Image: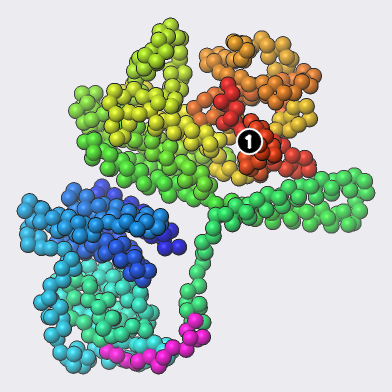
Amino acid sequence: MFLEETKDQIDYIEKEFLKLEKDGYDDEIIVSTLRMAHSIKGVCNTLNFSNMAKISHLLENVLVDLKDGKISIEAMVIDILFKLLDSLKKERENISLKKEEFLDLNKLTLEIEDFYSNLASNKLDEDIVEQKPKNLQIKANEEEKKESKGKEDILQKEELKLEEDELFLVNNVVEYLNIYKIAIYFSKGTKMKSGKAFLIINNLLGIGEIIQTTPNNYENLKDEEFSDAFFIIIATRSSQKEVYENINVISEIEDIGILNIREGKGIDKKKHLKDVKANNQVSSVRINMTDIDELLNLMGEFVIDRQKLFNISKNLKRRYGNDADIIRLNDNLRKIEFITSKMENIIMASRMLPLEYIFSRYERLVRDLSKKLNKNIKIEVYGEKTKIDRNIIEALVEPITHIVRNSIDHGIEDVEERKKSNKSEVAKIVIGARREKDNVLIEIKDDGRGINFDKIKEKIRKETFDTEKMDELSEKSLLNYIFESGFTTSKKINELSGRGIGLEIVNREIGKLNGIVEVKTKKNIGTKFTIKVPITLKIIKALLVEICEFKYAIASSLIIEIIRFKEKKDLNKYLEIVDGKYYYYWKGKELINVLNLASYMNFDCLDTKKTYLIILGHSEKRFGIIVPNILRNENIVIKDLTHFMGKDKIMGENLGILGVSTLGDGGFAQVLDIASLVKEL
């Protein structure tokens, strides 16, 4: 729970920091990220993750100085915010992996102090010439100033007396809690009083329950409408000193008065537990993904059995006509169909996440790499609310990252080159998504120099020494080479590219997802990668084909086109055979490999006159499969059999089969493993 929540919080802060860098200072962003950093610190202190708590505290300090106007938004400040955030990420990762190595906090603290010193020496802000980050070193005289105020003076202020309505509220609080009324006096000229009040409340909610605030609508008040005092009544098990310390960390507070209204009379554990349960009811729970997967598998079995019942019902109706029991059976089956459809949708939705879950991280990637390469790049994102299966969304991170890195390093020109080409100095990368039936299309495009086909040809010539072949290859065929393992046109290897690994990873990972990759490029205009993946891999829409009464399922997301030949001779007329392999001129211009599925599966019962050529896409490759008969489309649940396949295993080396699926008619279909079939071409 802690790891998931802190990840969400850190991702949120990072997204807000990117907005700060792009749009400049924003009160709401500063207050919200400060609240989030404080929340992380509180939880880390509770769980004794001291390093992570200290980093959160350092982050709070810089944000408070930003909020108080002691420093302003500029490159150095943004860089230090991201450095602290990266340190938080690293510590969280160490905790997740149960590593015993931790960041050197002394070094990090010194870097923060150097940052403030550099700001002062560069005169970036007159107000911080001799400032050090607040709370890195708490000044003794400030603490003494707070403590020097006579306690009797503080506690005897008229404002701390309870009003009649407050007495009523206090009397309804459980007896074992301490109750305090607090008066907080802001310094003259304090800005963002509502924001400070919010931070105070947020701090106190970590140790107790707020009964009342005055003014109660403090979040909506402007500074001129806000008096110098802010009043809180709190019920807590904490001491008066702990309450005071939770408030005193906020800046620009001139005075704090605390009246002990009532001391708790000890804790009734049973009653306390009941109250805690009542006060902590939530509208959502976290469920392990393995449980969701199991629920989905059971749902799939239920859908199959439901279809079997429908088939039995049809047979009974043909046999006995409109018998009263059969009519009631059909009515109930229709109700079951409605309920199971709703259940299936809910279970599928529970596995879905919006793509903003990963899209947001690319803003940071583009920012960091553009700075490293001295390029001026902005990123635009659309369709981030498009939802997709959680397992798929996690598998998309690496391939999209490699495409974005390639765009920045290879595609986007530096500022001088863009000027010569009469382009805007600010380059653009667009990442977007849209739903298309049962698939999601993800686009990553840039407005860079485009892919250089001459460099691709030069690289191929060096490796194949086949000059004639180069002249015959279409641009589409040439683009397929960039996905080959080890293929690169870079002459130098750097930390971003040059090893020919990135796009090979894209090819492999998208293939695992039963996805398709397409590339379009134009010189000096830019390059666009389009990734097409199914929204889920658990329940998929599949095309059922038949060979010698055996049924096979092909994921519909991979099917590009189906061509029907009336007779076998038509097939021989359009196919070419080279070295025992079949080829087909798809759309009259692209030569693609063709696999005869019946021959591959060692069947010899092909007596049908009909023949179909199914054009498939797997990652960047396009190829065809010949089948004698096509049955229908059907939603199927895949049962994984890979654990039973291989040498010395029960099913042996059954290449080309990914799993099986039980069909609604009671039969089953073997699901084709397109990735392994591609390797046979």
Q: Residue at x 39, y 32 (%)?
A: 502
Residues shaded magenta: 259-273
Q: How is the image coloured?
A: rainbow
Magenta stretch contains residue 498: no
* 619 displayed left or right of 228: right
Secondary structure under the numbered disc 1 in the rendered image: loop
The reply to whether residue 395 is in sight is: yes
Q: Which residue is mark 1?
A: 646
Please name whichever residue, 368 or 655, is drawn nearer the observer in this view of the structure. 655
Compared to 334, does 65 lie above or below? below
Q: Position of residue 530 (x, y in %)?
A: 45, 32
The amino acid marked with disc number 1 is: Gly
Image quadrant in which you'd find residue 295: bottom right
Q: Position of residue 610 (x, y in %)?
A: 75, 20
* 307 displayed left or right of 275: right
The reply to whether residue 541 is in sight is: no
Q: Residue at x 29, y 63 (%)?
A: 51
Please name whichever residue, 486 or 112, is drawn nearer the observer in this view of the structure. 486
